[in-house]
Image (cartoon, helix red, strand yellow):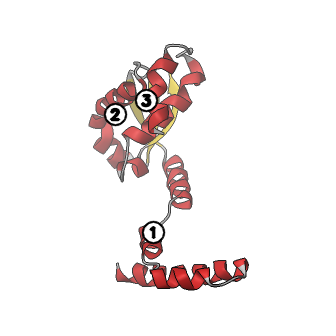
Amino acid sequence: MKDFLASLPAIMRNIDTEGNTIEPVVFAAWKRCVEGSLAEHIVPLRIENKRLIAAVANETWRKQVADLGSVITDKINAAVGSKLIRFIEFQIDPAAVRAHRKSIAETSVPDWTMAADEQLSPALTEAADSIRDSELREKFLAAATGSLAGRERYKR
């Protein structure tokens, strides 16, 4: 993704910056510029005449992020090397935010799962490697990781 974003200024000089052509570029930059918990609460929807329309769940969130619009705009424009966005309009659309959060949850790996993978000791890995049947070996590793993940999950 970093290589793609680094090449954007050169790409932007050669494409039409009007219409739907720029949406995928801006949305890719959005993912890089709007991170952390903020990314769960603001969802880019579309671009209309250099205005990025983004969804928030309610009026409280709209007020919270209203002042961030110019900062996010500057970050996106800097990332793509072109002034593709003039400003961001935050609209209340709880359904869009819920759908976005659901897609994040479906594609992300919980921290405790990664911690469990890191806890696979050399002895467990060696034991798995000694199992000749590949299907059984996979089941063994899945069971060991699941057990470790369960322990890790309940620690937190």
Disc 2 on helix, strand or loop? helix
Residue 136 located left or right of residue 90: right
| Residue at image point 50% right, 64% down | 109
- For the residue pair 76 and 47, the one nearer the viewer reads as 76
- Residue position for label 2: 72
| Residue at image point 51% right, 29% down | 25
- Residue position for label 3: 6
Q: Earlier in the sequence, mark 1 or mark 3?
A: 3
Name the amino acid type tagged 1.
Answer: Met
Name the amino acid type tagged 2.
Answer: Ile
Residue 12: percent from the left, percent from the top?
A: 49, 18
Q: CB atoms at circles 1 and 3 under 8 Å apart?
A: no
Q: Mark 2 and mark 1: span between their CA atoms? A: 30 Å
- Residue position for label 1: 114
Name the amino acid type tagged 3.
Answer: Ala
Q: Quadrant of residue 31?
A: top left
Of badges 2 and 3, the one in the foreground is 3
Q: Mark 1 and mark 3: span between their CA atoms? A: 29 Å
Establish if 130 lies above or below 89.
below
Residue 127 located left or right of residue 61: right
Q: Earlier in the sequence, mark 2 or mark 1?
A: 2
